[in-house]
Image (spheres, helix red, strand yellow):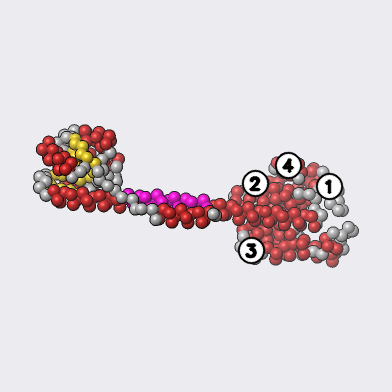
């Protein structure tokens, strides 16, 4: 059973569960008038309830804590702790437990205040109509059941929401993971086909990620560059083998064809609605553009070049310089560093080049780590 089926099953199971109900079995009476307590206790016991009695507010609160009754019946005027204070305290501790106020005829404000403090209903003393008393208790029982049901469904909805979020996050992670996998395998194909030195695209990705963070891009964007940078040369899939794998030096026409790997790569990726592939399309198109406008395919300059393009250009060239290629030996790190310095503001975004040079030790470590893991 997959996660969604499991959730649906659990939802149905919970939905079809019997409604929660609230049953009043135990009653706490708090009143300083002994006769009233005695009469009510006798009446309720005859009706089958278990009854506890307290004759002042403080004792009532203690008994409440000990017995946790299903209903509290209380007077408003009592020694030690007034009915209002008692109500406030009970409402705070147990808002879901019904509280019936029994009081002599008082003023309307006092009654309103008692209801406001947490009383659920009111009955005037002396109590002559016990049918009305039972009716009110029945209504409060229904209200308590509704509140309990509401609480139950709120908890249930919170639970479902939480499960849905977890499921969504899990699906997003799986999709992201699948994209990473596809990008990684595509990069391997390009690397093999264009005879790149082992792990070139991974090093470019790591250096680009480091530079993106140093530049001040968010962790999410830096991650995006790391995932998309390996696609920078994907357009080479559209370059004929005879040119791509030529052993001799390329003539001008051949070089013009090689240059089209940027636009080919862009066309391959541009129509995706996946963020990683979209970033890959930008990088494929712009990773040979130069800050001074001397690059290709469009001769963009400065900030016309997307930051993804500027970062990948620097990371790509630096790594190529350090590696042995068909027509060049690997360069010593110092020579490659000088190259970056020399081309700051021409090929490379000067601010990026400065950050790169300031962090050259960390970048060298990234390259070393990659060589060891590759
Ligand atoms: Fe390229
Ligand atoms: Fe490259």
Compare marks 2 and 1 and give the one earlier in the sequence.
2
Q: Quadrant of the C terminus?
A: top right
Q: Residue at x 26, y 52 (%)?
A: 142
Q: Residues within 10 Å of mark 1 (few under 14, many from 20)?
A: some
The mark that comes first in sequence, 3 or 4, is 3
Task: Identify the element where label 3 is drawn.
Answer: loop
Q: Do callouts 4 and 1 mark residues in contact (Cβ within 8 Å)?
A: no
Q: Which residue is mark 2?
A: 214
Q: Is 338 a magenta residue?
A: no
Which structural element holds mark 1? loop
Residue at 59 percent across and 52 percent down: it is 173
Q: Is residue 155 above or below residue 261?
A: above
Residue interval drawn in magenta: 148-167
Q: In the rendered image, is residue 306 in sight?
A: no
Q: Taking 310 as reference, is 139 left or right? A: left
Local packing at callout 3 (Cα closer than 10 Å; few below 14, some 14-19, many 20+) is few
Locate residue 256: give its quadrant: bottom right
On the image, the x and y values in percent for residue 57 come to 20, 36
Tell me the distance, in whole angstroms, between the alpha carbons under discs 4 and 2. 19 Å
Disc with the residue nearer the chain's start (3 vs 1): 3
CA separation in Å, label 3 and label 1: 37 Å
Q: Relative to the observer, which residue lies in front, 49 or 282? A: 49
Viewer-proximal residue among 362 and 58: 58
Residue located beneath label 1 in the image: 330
Q: Quadrant of the N terminus?
A: bottom right
Residue bearing the label numbered 3: 272
- Is 154 magenta? The answer is yes
Q: Secondary structure at mark 4?
A: helix
Across and down, in percent, residue 302 comes to 68, 58
Q: Going from the N terminus, do you reach mark 3 or mark 2 first?
A: 2
Q: Nearer the viewer's eye, disc 3 or disc 1?
A: 3
């Amino acid at each position: 059973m997959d996660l969604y089926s499991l959730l649906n099953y659990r939802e149905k199971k919970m939905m079809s569960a019997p409604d929660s109900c609230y049953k009043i079995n135990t009653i706490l009476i708090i009143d300083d008038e002994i006769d009233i307590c005695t009469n009510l206790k006798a009446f309720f016991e005859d009706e089958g309830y278990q009854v506890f009695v307290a004759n002042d507010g403080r004792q009532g609160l203690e008994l409440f804590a000990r017995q946790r009754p299903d209903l509290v019946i209380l007077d408003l005027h009592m020694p030690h702790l007034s009915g209002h204070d008692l109500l406030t305290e009970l409402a705070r501790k147990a808002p879901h437990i019904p509280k019936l106020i029994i009081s002599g005829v008082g003023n309307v404000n006092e009654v309103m205040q008692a209801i406001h403090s947490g009383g659920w209903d009111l009955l005037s003393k002396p109590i002559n109509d016990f049918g009305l008393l039972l009716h009110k208790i029945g209504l409060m029982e229904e209200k308590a059941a509704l509140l309990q049901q509401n609480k139950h469904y709120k908890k249930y909805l919170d639970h479902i929401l939480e499960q849905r979020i977890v499921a969504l996050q899990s699906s997003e992670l799986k999709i992201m993971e699948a994209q990473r996998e596809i990008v990684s395998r595509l990069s391997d194909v390009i690397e093999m086909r264009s005879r790149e030195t082992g792990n070139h695209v991974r090093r470019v990705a790591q250096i680009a990620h480091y530079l993106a963070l140093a530049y001040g891009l968010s962790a999410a964007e830096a991650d995006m560059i790391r995932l998309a940078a390996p696609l920078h040369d994907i357009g080479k899939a559209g370059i004929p083998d005879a040119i791509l794998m030529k052993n001799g030096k390329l003539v001008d026409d051949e070089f013009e064809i090689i240059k089209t790997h940027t636009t080919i790569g862009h066309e391959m990726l541009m129509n995706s609605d996946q963020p990683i592939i979209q970033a890959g399309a930008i990088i494929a198109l712009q990773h040979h553009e130069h800050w001074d406008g001397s690059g290709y395919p469009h001769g963009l300059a400065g900030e016309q070049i997307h930051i993804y393009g500027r970062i990948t250009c620097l990371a790509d060239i630096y790594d190529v310089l350090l590696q042995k290629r068909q027509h060049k030996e690997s360069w010593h790190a110092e020579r490659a560093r000088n190259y970056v310095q020399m081309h700051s503001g021409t090929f490379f975004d000067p601010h990026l080049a400065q950050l790169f040079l300031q962090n050259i030790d960390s970048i060298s470590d990234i390259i070393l780590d990659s060589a060891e893991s590759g």
